[in-house]
Image (spheres, coloured by chain):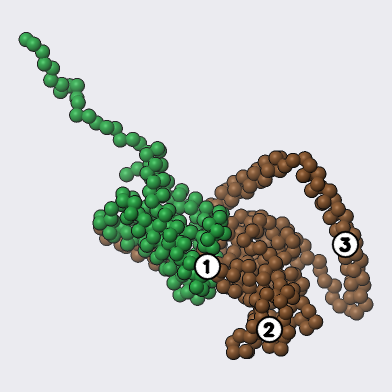
Amino acid sequence: MFKRPYYIAVALVALLTLLVLNLPGSTTARLKLAIGSIFLPLFGATGGIHQAAAKAGDALLPKGELIRANEALRRQNQELQVQAMRAGETARENTRLRQLVGWKAKAPWKVKLARVIARDPANWWRAVQIDRGSLDELRENLPVLTPDGLLIGRVSAVGLTSARVLLIGDPNCKVPAAILGDNAESGIITSAGLFNGSFVNLTYLANRTNIKPGQSVVTSGLSAIYPKGIPIGTVADARPVESGLYTEAQVKLAANLNALEEVWVLFP
Amino acid sequence: MTTLPNILILLATLLTVFAVGAFNGLRQLLGAQVDLLPALMVYTALSSGPPMMISMAVVGGLSFDTLSANPLGTSVLPLLLVGFVIQLRRDLILRDQIYAQLILGLLASAVAPAISLLILLTFGQSPLLGWGSLWQWTVMSGGGAVATPMFFALFGWLNHALGYQRIIETSFRPDREIRRRRN
């Protein structure tokens, strides 16, 4: 049985916890940052082990396979150089036309590579931790992409050397998106439920919209966070909801959110 | 009481939170991550005193929330409640029985996430919930139930390997030996 001081101690801790729960977000973010630093050596060690294992795996690869991969990469590199030349020409033409019309020139986006070090341990959030933080100039609300350039979410909290990324499908990660096509309809990407990890809903689409499965969905650019045109996925299905008030499309995500290892953080 | 078991429990708490965040094999296989902290709390509440139980709840809960999008402090209260209830009834619990450990682990792992969700909803958060949450709850409860006897076995082994061994005293004392001899 407990003695009286222990009852008081338990009550005090419970009270303090309730106080912490009611603290402002900025204060708890700083507290989280301080406590999270305990795990930095562990994440560093895990990263080191991963790299060592990858290096050991590379060392075991047969030479023939390496030569084949090298050839394939060389061919891909040549194709990409041609594409980059064309894109560069298009960008220059775009800049000239913008100057002629008098539009404001778009600043090019920069990217920074980050490694995914942990997933949210709670089952009711979709978030990951990356190994870049404010020391790497990261800040909140920067878009995050896969190495293939597919949108996966946004930075939601930043520590010194790590940051939390809310993934698409999390209730707190809503993305303005548009369906590519003749009449580009835009809506909001929201969660599609717990077990539809590779699907999200595109809601608030107009009823007259003629949506077909297979149409591409990209960011609409109607927000200060996500630039226009980042691929998100493809339409799988569409149905009227809320007694026909608007249409909702189910979108299959192009990125596999369960197999994230490295991501790009986009900087304006 | 030595400090070694307490240090081991706190170290295990931090390592458990790190493992739950860093390793996701079970999440990909079953669609849910098992939270091992309630299982560890069962062991702590049955093997240590109230100060250690409170420390474990605070360290475990805060570190879990640090790696999670939970508001800081969400996971402390459920762990504290689980530990408190177990310690109130610890004299009646057959702590060495695997069956008792399984049942306690199952109950603790079922109750703790439910209270966490209740706190989140009370504080105006909107966690990802649906019918699938029932499956996740089942996986978390089952995983916690299996993990509890494993924690008992692990700590038993660690305490045996790292702690001081009790010297077995025999009833034989040379100074009180009755020497029989023929006169």
Chain the render paints green: B
Q: Secondary structure at mark 2?
A: strand
The percent position of residue A201, horizontal first and vertical second, equals 63, 76
Q: Chain of mark 1?
A: A
Q: Position of residue B12 (x, y in %)?
A: 45, 49
Instruction: Read off the chain for label 2.
Output: A
Q: Position of residue A233 (x, y in %)?
A: 70, 70
Left or right, A44 with respect to B1, comes to right
Nearest the viewer among B116 and A86 is A86
Residue on which the image places disc 1: A124
* Mark 3 crowd level (few <14, some 14–19, many ≥20, 10 Å Cα): few
What is the chain identity of the residue bearing mark 3?
A
**Crowd tier of the residue under label 1, counting other residues whose Cα lies within 10 Å: few below 14, some 14–19, many 20 or above:** many
Q: Nearer the viewer, residue A137 or A92?
A: A92
Q: Quadrant of the N terminus of chain A?
A: bottom left
Which chain shows up in brown? A
Q: Determine which residue is flagged by label 3.
A: A83
Give amino acid for label 2.
Leu
Above/below status of B21 relative to A196: above
Which residue is at a point 48% across and 67% down the rendered structure image? Answer: B135
Disc 1/disc 3 C-alpha distance (Å): 42 Å
Query: Which amino acid lies under the numbered mark 1 shown in the image of this protein?
Result: Trp
Disc 1 secondary structure class: loop
* Residues at marks 3 and 2, CA–CA distance in whole angstroms: 34 Å
